[in-house]
């Protein structure tokens, strides 16, 4: 089974998933305002979370994730090895 990703590894996952440079993926970067992640990209990202990271995000929780830091915290809290 996979180990939990560090924040830097998680940045790499997001960079690949969103086609955004890791330098822009700071913990306080807003997915909507700073990174222009619209609702369609958010849905795609949630699917990648489930498929590649093994973390399922219910839709009601997805709307609570506003920043890169929020996304990592959610991942870290719900990761199961």
Image (spheres, rainbow, N blue to C red):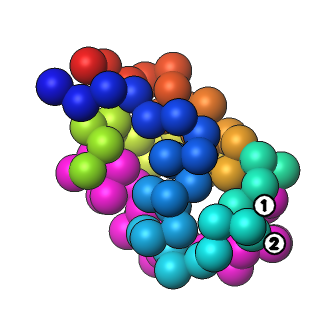
Circles 1 and 2 in contact, beta carbons < 8 Å: yes
Q: Residue furthest left?
A: 1
Residue at 77% of width from left, 55% of height from top? 26
Q: CA distance from mark 1 to mark 2?
A: 5 Å
Give the image location of residue 30, x and y in percent: 78, 61
Relative vertical location of residue 14 with respect to residue 16 in this rendering, above or below:
above
Residue 35 position within the rendered picture, expressed as x and y whole percent measured from the top left: 72, 74
Mark identifier at residue 30: 1
Asked if residue 54 is positioned above or below residue 43 in the image, the reply reads above
Task: Please state the extent of the stretch shown in magenta in the rendering.
Answer: 29-51
Q: For residue 68: magenta?
A: no
The x, y position of residue 15, in whole percent, is 53, 68
The C terminus: image quadrant: top left
Quadrant showing the N terminus: top left
Mark number, residue 4? none
Please indicate whether residue 10 sits to the left or right of residue 24 in the image: left
**Looking at the picture, how far across and down is residue 47, in whole percent?**
31, 58
Q: Nearer the viewer, residue 81 or 42?
A: 81
Residue 67 seen: no
Q: Residue at x 50, y 59 (%)?
A: 12
Left or right: where does residue 76 sit relative to residue 35?
Answer: left
- The residue located at (32%, 58%) in the rendering is 48
Judging depth in this view, the residue of 53 and 65 nearest the camera is 53
In the rendering, which numbered label is found on residue 33?
2
Mark 1 falls on what kind of element?
A: loop
Label 1 Cα neighbours within 10 Å, binned few <14 / some 14-19 / many ≥20: some
Q: What is the count of numbered marks?
A: 2
In the structure shown, which secondary structural element does the residue marked by tag 2 occupy?
Answer: loop
Within-10-Å neighbours for mark 2: few <14, some 14–19, many 20+: few
Whether residue 61 is visible to the viewer of this picture, yes or no, is yes
């Amino acid at each position: 089974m996979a180990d939990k990703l560090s924040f830097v590894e998680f940045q790499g996952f997001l960079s690949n998933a969103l086609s955004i440079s890791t330098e822009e993926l700071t913990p306080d970067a807003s997915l909507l305002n700073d990174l222009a992640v619209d609702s369609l990209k958010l849905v795609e990202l949630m699917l990648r979370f489930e498929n590649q990271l093994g973390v399922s995000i219910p839709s009601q929780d997805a709307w609570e994730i506003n920043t890169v830091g929020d996304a990592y915290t959610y991942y870290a809290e719900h990761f199961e090895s």
